[in-house]
Image (cartoon, rainbow, N blue to C red):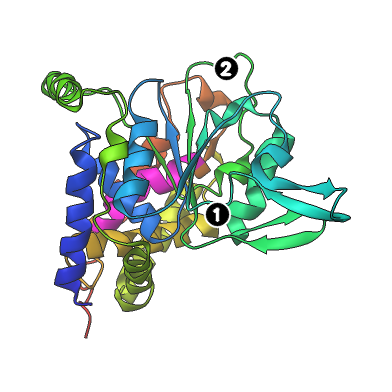
Amino acid sequence: MAVSSASQKLQKIIDEVSNYFIGNRLVVMKTLASALVNGHVLFEDHPGLGKTLLAKTFAKVIGCKFTRVQFTPDLLPSDIIGVKVWRGKLGTFELVKGPIFTHILLADEINRAPPKTQAALLEAMEERQVTIEGETFKLEEPFFVLATQNPLEYEGTYPLPEAQLDRFTLRLSTGYPSHESMVEILKSRLKWGKDDPTVDIKPVISREEFLSLQRMVEHEIYIDEAILDYIASVVETARRNPKVEAGPSPRGALTLMKVSKAIALIMGRDFVIPDDVKMIAVDALAHRIILRAEYVFEEVSPAVVVKEALDKVPVPKEAKAKA
């Protein structure tokens, strides 16, 4: 598949999703970029901003299976991954698969489940497999998690540990729509005549085509050594910031590299430029930064640390396109 053809398909996905998830095309683009590298996304936002609609619409448009799990304090690991049930008449155990056996899993309010249940996702998120009573099962491709959590409501929640936050490729925020977008949302609801329009959505591409686009990002998008040096420098500069207790790990740098390649393909290029890296640097690195205690209550955020690193590190001017 040519780069121009692939880019057209990806723009068509963004256009179709944006017909239903109205008001923030950039979030749709970044979600797609993360999906192209099988990356998981954590949406940290208030309720009612369309995160579930975005996930369902996205799954339908790319021809993939979608499952939603509402995380609650009494949710058990077996409620997510499944369990083996004894069938007396057959004299054997039968595997009852959980909702994790899907392509796109929406983990709604993920921080409301206890750590043991949150940890049930770790193996699936990292290795694309689950282990049920000693037996390992591979998950179908593609597989990625879209998780949500409310950034303001902490009562009855279990904050995600750093190890699990690090598994998320990007942390995004949809934000409140503008006045114009709000009017368009209201008009769309009248046009649909129902609260859930996703039942009528037809796929823009097939699952197999999406998998081929993933392979294209992995193998056919060139990234120059100067860009690799730029990524490493941004990560190291953020890590050495005196406000930082613990900075981004090598996984953060790998994430920045992979998603910037996906951004390049979406934009119609077979090579990465510094602007691709800048576009997703905050989303890829900020949630991997732990600030020193004295700065937590000041007007300092991990996003500010990443932006300072981007300002300090010189942008490479001799990065080459694909030979």
Residue 278 colored magenta? yes
Q: Quadrant of residue 249?
A: bottom right
Kindly identify which residue carries mark 2.
154
Residue at (58, 44) in percent of width and height: 99
The spot of residue 183 in percent (x, y) is 13, 19
Q: Is residue 70 above or below residue 153?
A: below
Side of 53 relative to 117 (left or right): left
* Number of the label disc, if any, that sits on residue 63: none
Q: Label 1 sits on what residue type?
A: Ser
The spot of residue 289 in percent (x, y) is 51, 41
Q: Which class describes the residues within 10 Å of circle 2: few (<14), some (14-19), or many (20+)?
A: few
* Number of the label disc, if any, that sits on residue 249: 1
* Secondary structure of the residue carrying numbered label 1: loop
Dots 1, 2 in contact, CB < 8 A: no
The spot of residue 306 in percent (x, y) is 38, 43
Q: Is residue 147 above or below residue 223?
A: above
